[in-house]
Image: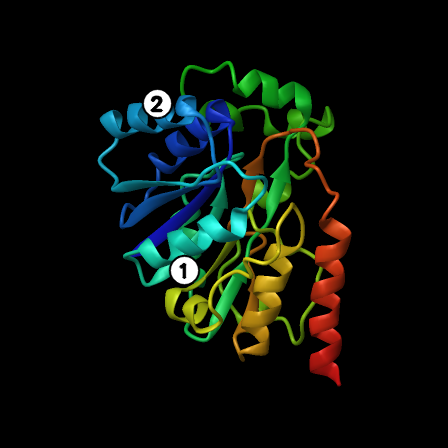
Amino acid sequence: MISILLATYNWPQALKLCLESLGTQTDRDFEIIIADDGSTETTKHAIEQFKTSCSIAIQHLWQEDQGFRKTTILNQAIAAARGEYLIFLDGDCIVQPDFVARHRNLAQQGHLVTGSRVLLNEKLTKELLTWPHWDFQRFSAGLLAKRIRGEINKYLPLKMKLGSGRWRDYKKFVWRRIKGCNMACWKVDAQAISGFDETMTGWGHEDADFIFRLQRNHIIRKSGAWATEVLHLFHQIHDQSNAAENARRVREKILAKAM
């Protein structure tokens, strides 16, 4: 079974669309574990509403809001996961109906997958948030026109899907295209490196640190582009006051390995 570890914080309208998109998956053999970094009761209500309309197993893990502590709640989610394979997803992302199926197709022992995303602009995001329910067919109508208008930043990866293969493998650690909102690995591999580094607080680069330590532990990184694209809703940039320090710490680990 696959466990989807869904990180969220105080955006229940986006989380509702994300959960509804997970409810339309062609591959149903998965559970959802919501890793909640201190949201209010409104988020809890949105989750409870989803539970009444969907048979997929769902857990809601919550921790007190003490600033950005995504690493801590994700480690709790890793421990709680019943699946042997973990997909990391953010609550501001909507998935395509074959998202789980595509990730399952790319899953391979000794590998991790870093997925891709399609950025939605503010106008389209506001429109989607007014929809009573997520509807992928409705979204897909006029997709090329959306690209021409600049409402999405990619078109072809939503229309063309590529399978697995050695061409997806990275030969070394590359910072580029690591997105914590869409990545996957085996639970045993995540546990072997003790999950995320909980000393990294504040937004930024906790995902790169996680991927680097997996690769340092002889796990091969595999690209999930042209297969697993998620739709990333527009939002204001997070507080990045800790990002530079977090990046410095990751670079120190990379340098230490090189030495």
Picture quarter containing residue 26?
top left
Between 73 and 224, the one nearer to me in the picture: 73
Label 2 Cα crowd, 10 Å radius (few <14 / some 14-19 / many 20+): few
Image coords of residue 16 (percent x, y): 42, 26
Image coords of residue 64 (percent x, y): 46, 38
Q: Amino acid at mark 1?
A: Asn
Q: Amino acid at mark 2?
A: His
The residue lying at 39 percent from left, 57 percent from top is 78
The residue lying at 54 percent from left, 34 percent from top is 92
Q: Secondary structure at mark 1?
A: helix
Q: Earlier in the sequence, mark 2 or mark 1?
A: 2
Q: Secondary structure at mark 2?
A: helix
Q: Which mark is residue 45?
A: 2
Image coords of residue 128 (percent x, y): 53, 20
Residue 170, relative to residue 22: is it above or below?
Answer: below
In the image: residue 139, left or right of residue 247: left
In the image: residue 25, left or right of residue 160: left
Residue denoted by label 1: 105
Picture quarter containing residue 52?
top left
Between 179 and 248, the one nearer to me in the picture: 248
Q: Count of labels shown?
A: 2
Image coords of residue 183 (percent x, y): 52, 55
The residue lying at 52 percent from left, 61 percent from top is 113
